[in-house]
Image (cartoon, rainbow, N blue to C red):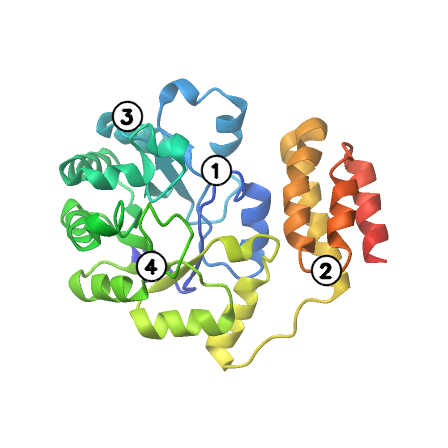
Amino acid sequence: MKIGRHTVTNPLILAPMAGVTDFPFRSLCRALGAGLTPSEMVAANPKLRNSRKSQLRLSHHHEESPRIVQIAGGNAAMLADAARYNADLGAEVIDINMGCPAKKVCNKAAGSALLKDEKHVQEILEAVVKAVDIPVTLKTRTGWDTSSKNYLRIAKIAEDAGIAALALHGRTRADRFQGQAEYDSIAEVKTQIKIPVIANGDIDSPQKAHQVLRHTNADALMIGRAAQGNPWIFLEINHYLQTGERLAPPSNEEVLQTLTQHLNGLYNLYGEFMGPRIARKHVGWYLKTRPNSESFRREFNKIDTAKVQLETIAVFFE
């Protein structure tokens, strides 16, 4: 798959998820088999750039190439400016968010709310593509709701505007994450446009990844919620696609080692106060299928220091 001048040989992409896919998590997923790891959604509004959250998300120089930064907003000129700004900071691909279903995003006429106005979508895509000399990609959904699915028109608008690749979550905004993903819709888009199409939605196992690739003929797969607490999913899918065999799950020692590395990354990035608090949700995801995890997590969520968190995790795995 080619995205502009970048050749992508690994078809597995980590989905950008706000509050989840920060630098420590992206680094783990890349090390464990993700081919591309886009940033968390970055607000296009320049007034938000100096906030601590934005500053942490705007640092791209540690990333492996190609560095992909996802931007979100509802104003074409503002999004174009945000694309230039992030390109100057080292982004090598700009991704535009038109898929986020969150109310706080849609209420600002951003994310998947943009799908209600196709002319505005065209204005945004054309403005961002013209603003930078690096590839621009688009992540979107099949429409605002089941009565207004416009994924084919959006896909053609994107291709005509110069978008380099399209990631399609096979759900409407109204669906959020409920119901079955529409792989037929993704397959239909693949037959109608020439730019790479990336399938997204409910890809949670190696077998499912294989099925979705065959059904949609997509150029790549985007994996989101299934990677939370399970960065090994990329390793497992890659192995299955190449050999047709399932990898054994990671051992307790491997899980503890990876989780410890992840937590230390969070502490280093966010500091002693916020690091342990952000770590709590990740620990919950890592341990959700393990015996006695619920009672452990209730006690773990009361711990507010990195040192005690690490000690407690080590004892749990013993």
Q: Residue at x 51, y 76 (%)?
A: 240
| Residue 42 numbered mark, or none | none
How crowded pointer 1 is (Cα within 10 Å; few <14, some 14-19, many 20+) is rated as many
Of the numbered discs 2 and 1, the one sitting upstream in the chain is: 1
Marks 2, 4: nearer the viewer = 2
SS of the residue under disc 3? helix
Q: Which mark is residue 290?
A: 2
Q: Which label's residue is closer to the chain start, 4 or 3?
A: 3
Q: What element carries label 4?
A: strand
Between label 3 and label 2, give the one nearer the viewer: 2
Instruction: Count the marks.
Output: 4
Q: Which amino acid does label 4 sit on?
A: Ile
Q: Report if the CB atoms under discs 2 and 1 are less than 8 Å apart.
A: no
Q: Distance between the residues labelled 2 and 4?
A: 32 Å
Between label 2 and label 1, give the one nearer the viewer: 2
> Crowding at label 2, few (<14), some or many (≥20) Cα neighbours within 10 Å?
few
The amino acid on which the numbered mark 1 sits, given as a three-letter code, is His
> Which disc, if any, is residue 60?
1
